[in-house]
Image (cartoon, helix red, strand yellow):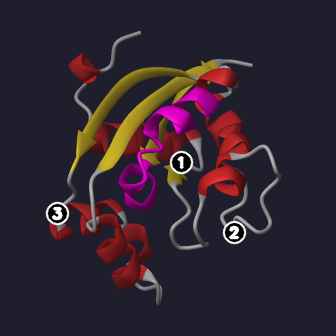
Amino acid sequence: MAVERTLSIIKPDATRRNLTGKINAVFEGNGLRIVAQKRIQLTKATAGAFYEVHKERPFYNDLVSFMISGPVVVQVLEGEGAVLKNREVMGATDPKKAEAHTIRAQFAESIEANSVHGSDSLENAKNEIAFFFAGTEILP
């Protein structure tokens, strides 16, 4: 399997509860390296643009409102098959359906406040990483 990069966002519910370090420990314990990271406050315009793909879905406005409700930590994770590995480590979107060892099973408050976002494909990972990071900000 090839070394890949993927985007991860630690969401406002998790940053509010000071879980960044614990969540990062799960990533690192599963072979994912953090090669870029920054704590930011999303604006409505930025969150709206990032989640543009969901604009026609009924949850879009609530998602944008949630993502601007507090700071987030955006980061680039790197490792063998990083996109799929991150999806496995995060667990199911609904924390009630997530396997016990996953981030969402351990830390999510609800299906909406599920603590983390991760790219769902290599192509989306490249686009999402470029949305938040300049190439010079990513250090191997």
Q: Secondary structure at mark 2?
A: loop
Find the magenta span and give its range: 10-26
| Magenta segment, prevailing SS (helix, strand or loop) | helix
The three-letter amino acid code for the residue at tag 2 is Asp
Residue at x 27%, y 61% (from the top left corner): 70
Residue count near mark 1 (Cα–Cα under 10 Å), binned few <14, some 14–19, many ≥20 = many
Q: Can you give x and y, in whole percent of width and height, for residue 66 in the image?
A: 36, 72
The three-letter amino acid code for the residue at tag 1 is Gly
Observer-side mark, 2 or 1, equals 2
Q: Can you give x and y, in whole percent of width and height, for residue 89 in the image?
A: 70, 40
Location of mark 1 (residue):
118
Residue at x 30%, y 76% (from the top left corner): 65
Residue 94 numbered mark, or none: 2
Furthest toward the top, the residue is: 140
**How far apart in space, not on screen, are marks 2 and 1 (Cα)?**
14 Å
Relative to residue 49, is residue 57 drawn left or right? Answer: right
Which quadrant of the figure has residue 48?
bottom left
The three-letter amino acid code for the residue at tag 3 is Thr
